[in-house]
Image: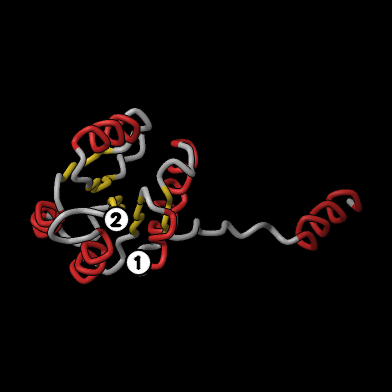
């Protein structure tokens, strides 16, 4: 069994955070929930780089917006993929540091899960290619066996 991927989920809205946590946990992810950007930074300080697989946060939050949170998170964990979600589609230009921007309401939960799957896979890196036996080698073995 593969180890669960860990997602830091940040939103100042308790209800949205609960729904998102439930959605991710039922898909096999381990979720660390934070109610503010400051709380998320505290969580990031507690994890070693490479142990978190994704940060998923709201863009509009009090004290510190999601873009600033992602910028600071990437300073602490340089390879950490980040997805920002926002209720305002025109806020896309404010999500400069995220790998993915997803407008709330304009995308389905299934689309969010798929984007998360891709980001987590990208963090892990591409699968190592298994060298295929060359056709000439297999043809040579076939020819040799029939010639005898």
Tell whether label 1 touches label 2 (CB within 8 Å).
Answer: yes
Asked where in the image residue 66 lies, by quadrant, the reply is bottom left
Task: Please tell me whether residue 67 is drawn above or below residue 138 in the rendered image.
Answer: below
Q: Residue at x 61, y 60 (%)?
A: 131
Q: What x and y, as percent, mark residue 146?
A: 89, 49
Q: What x and y, as percent, mark residue 22?
A: 29, 29
Residue that mark 1 sits on: 94
Please identify the quadrant where the N terminus is shown: top left
Q: Secondary structure at mark 2?
A: loop
* Viewer-closest of 111 and 16: 16
Task: Please tell me whether residue 110 is drawn above or below residue 89 in the rendered image.
Answer: above
| Distance from the alpha carbon under mark 2 to that under mark 1 | 8 Å
Which of the two labelled residues, at mark 2 and mark 1, occupies the earlier sequence position?
2
Left or right, residue 90 beside residue 24: right
Label disc, if present, on residue 108 of the rendered structure: none
Asked where in the image residue 17 lies, by quadrant, the reply is top left
Q: Secondary structure at mark 1?
A: helix
Q: Residue at x 31, y 53 (%)?
A: 54
Q: Residue at x 34, y 55 (%)?
A: 84
Residue that mark 2 sits on: 59
Label 1: few (<14), some (14–19) or many (≥20) C-alpha neighbours in 10 Å: some
Left or right, residue 136 beside residue 16: right
Q: What x and y, as percent, mark residue 74?
A: 25, 67
């Amino acid at each position: 069994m593969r180890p669960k991927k860990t997602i830091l989920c940040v939103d100042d809205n308790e209800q949205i955070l609960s729904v998102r946590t439930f959605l991710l946990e039922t898909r096999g992810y381990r979720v660390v929930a934070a109610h503010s950007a400051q709380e998320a930074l505290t969580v990031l300080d507690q994890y070693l780089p490479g142990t978190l697989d994704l940060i998923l946060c709201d863009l509009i939050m009090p004290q510190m917006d999601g873009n600033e949170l992602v910028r600071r998170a990437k300073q602490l964990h340089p390879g950490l993929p980040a997805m920002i979600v926002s209720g305002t589609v025109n806020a896309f230009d404010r999500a400069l540091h995220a790998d993915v921007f997803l407008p709330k309401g304009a995308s389905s939960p299934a689309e969010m899960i798929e984007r998360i799957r891709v980001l987590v896979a990208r963090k892990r890196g591409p699968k190592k290619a298994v060298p295929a036996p060359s056709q000439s080698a297999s043809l040579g073995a076939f020819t040799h066996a029939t010639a005898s």
